[in-house]
Image (spheres, rainbow, N blue to C red):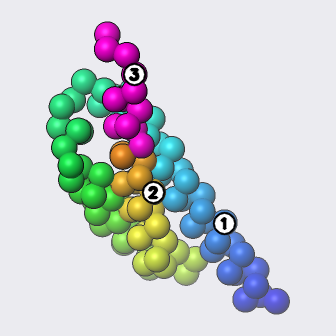
Amino acid sequence: MFEFIGNFLWLIITGAISIGGYVTMKKFVQQRLRFVDGVHRRGVPLLAGVAGWAVALPAAILPIVNPFTAVLFGIGIGAGVAAGRREIKRLPSP
């Protein structure tokens, strides 16, 4: 019973962290990095995802968070950067 509760709690925390990273980075890229040319380079989402993973990896010492959570957080960060820069391209020029 307790294992089920622990797994369910891990699933909720991992989902919230991944979705939170995605939404936060998408908004940040759209609002703050709109006029930065470097965000449109090919490897920027990958670099941002790896940096997000590296920042979240020390949290893996917590009992609920494991390295897979850090990987999903990095994927959410990278996907958020990619989605944010796609939205910038769709916006009309000022």
Residue 82 picture location, percent across and down: 36, 46
Residue 59 visible in this rendered orientation of the protein: no
Taking 94 as reference, is 2 above or below it?
A: below
In the image, taking residue 36 as reference, residue 10 lies left or right, namely right
* Badge 3 amino acid: Leu
Q: Which residue is mark 2?
A: 76
Locate the C terminus and report the quarter of the image it occupies. Answer: top left
* Mark seen at residue 91: 3
Q: Are marks 2 and 3 in contact (CB under 8 Å)?
A: no
Residue 26: say if magenta. Answer: no
Part of the protein shown in magenta? 83-94
Residue 43 picture location, percent across and down: 21, 53
* Badge 2 amino acid: Gly
| Residue at image coords 49%, 71% | 69
Locate the N terminus and report the quarter of the image it occupies. Answer: bottom right
In which quadrant of the rendered view does residue 3 lie? Answer: bottom right
Q: Residues within 10 Å of mark 2 (few under 14, many from 20)?
A: many
Rounded to the nearest angstrom, the CA distance separating label 1 from label 2 is 15 Å
Rounded to the nearest angstrom, the CA distance separating label 2 from label 3 is 23 Å
SS at mark 2 in the image = helix
Among numbered discs 2 and 3, the one appearing first in the sequence = 2
